[in-house]
Image: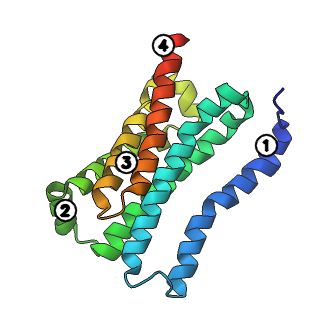
């Protein structure tokens, strides 16, 4: 029998704790930048870490539905929106790090990069697709879009594939981590396909 926290516990305990936990990666990066402990190339470290945390939060968000169905943890659905918004938050941090510290807001160079470098093209496409999901994450937008909301938010699976591809192309040597992320994503997509066929 699954244990279900009360709505008050979710709202006043679990959500605030989760919010703080989700901010820890950014806090650690900020401390590292201030203390100059991010290595020989701090910009590369910040770009890599914010990008990888975007992918991690994306996979965690996708994991909510399987856990809810398999373990009966239906209360997890109340946390999915926050996790999804943190995907967008870290994606913004990732893009901002690239635009600000790598390209110094040079629009022409950014456009050339997006066109000429496939991994940046894919990453930028994934970010653009994230925007409507973040904008329509409110209850008001869910009610307004009705069934179209669900159709729109299925883009998260395409975004996940693009994000993984972006990460794989970015990695130059050790492919173990991308392989692990890829396996997790494959299992999540397989579960979704299996559930749809048997429901």
Q: Quadrant of residue 100?
A: bottom left
Q: Earlier in the sequence, mark 1 or mark 4?
A: 1
Mark 2 to mark 4: distance in Å? 41 Å
Q: Which of marks 3 and 2 is nearer the N terminus?
A: 2
Mark 3 crowd level (few <14, some 14–19, many ≥20, 10 Å Cα): many
Residue positioned 41% across, 42% down in the render: 160
Q: In which quarter of the image is the C terminus?
A: top right
Mark 4 crowd level (few <14, some 14–19, many ≥20, 10 Å Cα): few
Do callouts 1 and 3 mark residues in contact (Cβ within 8 Å)? no
Q: Name the residue under label 2.
A: 113
Q: Which of marks 3 and 4 is nearer the N terminus?
A: 3
Residue positioned 56% across, 68% down in the render: 26
For label 2, the SS is helix
Q: In which quarter of the image is residue 115?
A: bottom left
Mark 3 to mark 2: distance in Å? 19 Å
Q: Which of marks 1 and 2 is nearer the N terminus?
A: 1
Q: Where is residue 16 in the image (x, y as percent from the top left)?
A: 74, 54
Residue positioned 39% across, 68% down in the render: 47
Q: Mark 4 points at which residue?
A: 197
Q: Name the residue under label 3.
A: 164
Q: Which mark is residue 10?
A: 1
Q: Can residue 98 be seen in this view?
A: yes
For label 4, the SS is helix
Above or below for 130 versus 111: above
Q: Position of residue 34 (x, y in %)?
A: 53, 85
For label 3, the SS is helix
Mark 1 to mark 3: distance in Å? 31 Å
Q: Earlier in the sequence, mark 2 or mark 4?
A: 2
Mark 1 to mark 2: distance in Å? 43 Å
């Amino acid at each position: 029998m699954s244990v279900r926290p009360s709505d008050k516990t979710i709202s006043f305990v679990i959500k605030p704790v989760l919010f703080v936990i989700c901010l820890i990666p950014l806090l650690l990066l900020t401390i590292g930048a201030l203390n100059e402990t991010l290595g020989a190339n701090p910009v590369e470290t910040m770009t890599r870490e914010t990008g990888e945390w975007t992918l991690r939060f994306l996979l965690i968000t996708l994991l909510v539905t399987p856990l809810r169905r398999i373990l009966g943890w239906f209360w997890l659905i109340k946390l999915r929106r926050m996790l999804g918004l943190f995907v967008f938050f870290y994606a913004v941090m990732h893009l901002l790090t690239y635009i600000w510290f790598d390209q110094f807001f040079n629009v022409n160079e950014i456009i050339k990069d997006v066109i000429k470098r496939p991994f940046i093209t894919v990453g930028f496409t994934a970010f653009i697709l994230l925007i409507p999901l973040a904008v329509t994450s409110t209850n008001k937008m869910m009610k307004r879009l009705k069934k179209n909301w669900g159709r729109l938010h299925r883009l998260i699976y395409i975004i996940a594939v693009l994000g993984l591809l972006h990460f794989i192309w970015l990695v130059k040597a050790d492919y173990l981590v991308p392989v692990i992320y890829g396996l997790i994503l494959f299992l999540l997509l397989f579960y979704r396909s299996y559930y749809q066929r048997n429901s």
